[in-house]
Amino acid sequence: MQYVDFGKTGVKVSRLGMGCMRLPSHEENGKTVFDEEESIALIHRAMELGVNYFDTAPYYCDKLSEVFLGKALALDGRRDKVWVSTKNPIENDSGDDYEKRLENSLKNLQTDHIDFYHFWGVSLNAFLTKVKAKDGPFERAKKLKEQGIIRHISFSFHDREAGAQESEKLIEILKNGEGVLESVLCQYNLLDRDKEPGIALAREMGLGTVIMGPVGGGRLGAPSPVIQELIPGGVKSSAEVALRFVLANRNINVALSGVSNIVQLEENAAVASRTDALSPQELETIDAVLKENERLAGLYCTGCKYCMPCPKGVNIPEIFTIMNYHRVYKITGFAKKSYAEIGKVPWRQFQNAAACINCGACEKKCPQSLPIREQLKETHRVLAG
């Protein structure tokens, strides 16, 4: 396993971190049941492979993730050999409530301190209005750090409403938390590169940088000849390409791998243990191919959202994004799975292309004059078939 300095925290971290959001589970009477024994064994195997950064959160795995990690680390003094990262859902601007949620995590994790404690999934607006409210979570976190209960104050970033300005909003949080925030967790991968400037600034400011979703939430774990051919000479999987790409970014310290079995863990650990990083020439090749793929995707839809709202609730840009996984990146299995989730999962609460009534309102507003109605029909034919 390779290790690096984690910003200016004085901590050495493994390049691969274990994300404890997808711990082993099985179906029982139509319900997902998480397996405690297998989860603990998986965490122990990660430690054997050299992983020393473990990331969890109060609500992961039906609220059992922190509990399982706590039990795994309570055995044989393992807690002192790793760095534990967990999160505080900023539900309001109350410092008292923030501390109560911290106390619950300490109990779950069977520990007296959290190494890296995150304001969880904050947008710029939430950071300014809730985290930094008078006598709110920000000030309470500083006091708890003085007491040694929080060792390093961190934040994870989500700003789904930000669109193209997402990196700028990340940068604003970094500036507003300067001198206090010590590490950042955000999404970054081959297909989601918009936050590169923010990640670079975080490293320049001395923060530790952790990446979630290095394989794109499963998108890049699916077989794809387009992705696998990015690195000449052959690779085992699309996931290997994706992980090597993230680890080659000099501004990134840790890539979190959300694993649910030993095979996934050992494959990712093998990649993170390689000493031969992607060369500048390989990265230039990858960048050129990705830019061309982005251009091709833009021919289908740039995601400007001028076509919205659809009177029938069809999320046209999101549907075309899903279609591009198939059309441009050949991740067809993932595209079909994502399309089937429309209207069934919280993050896809809209109508699929079949709801189009051919009114043409979208096409009148499209700056590219795209044949949106025909493309919707094609999308449904390909992805629902």
Image (cartoon, rainbow, N blue to C red):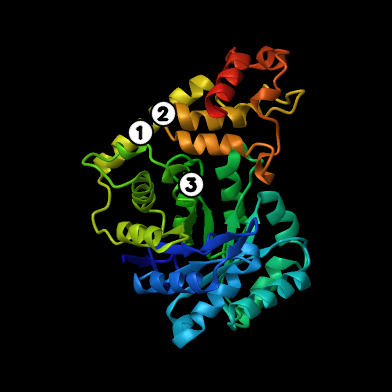
Q: Which residue is mark 1?
A: 226
* Residue drawn at (39%, 61%) of the image: 265
Mark 2 in CB contact with mark 1 (< 8 angstroms): yes
User: Considering only order in the chain, which callout, 3 or 1, is on the residue closer to the N terminus?
Assistant: 3
In the drawing, what numbered circle is on residue 218? 3
Give the residue type at disc 1: Val
Residue 59 placement (x, y as % from top left): 65, 63
Q: Is residue 287 visible?
A: no
In the picture provided, is 133 more to the left or to the right than 194?
right
User: Considering only order in the chain, which callout, 1 or 2, is on the residue closer to the N terminus?
Assistant: 1
In the picture provided, is 220 more to the left or to the right than 305?
left
Q: Is residue 148 above or below residue 88?
A: below
Q: Indicate the secondary structure of the residue bearing disc 1.
A: helix
* Spatial CA span between label 2 and label 3: 19 Å
Q: Indicate the secondary structure of the residue bearing disc 2.
A: helix
* Spatial CA span between label 1 and label 3: 16 Å
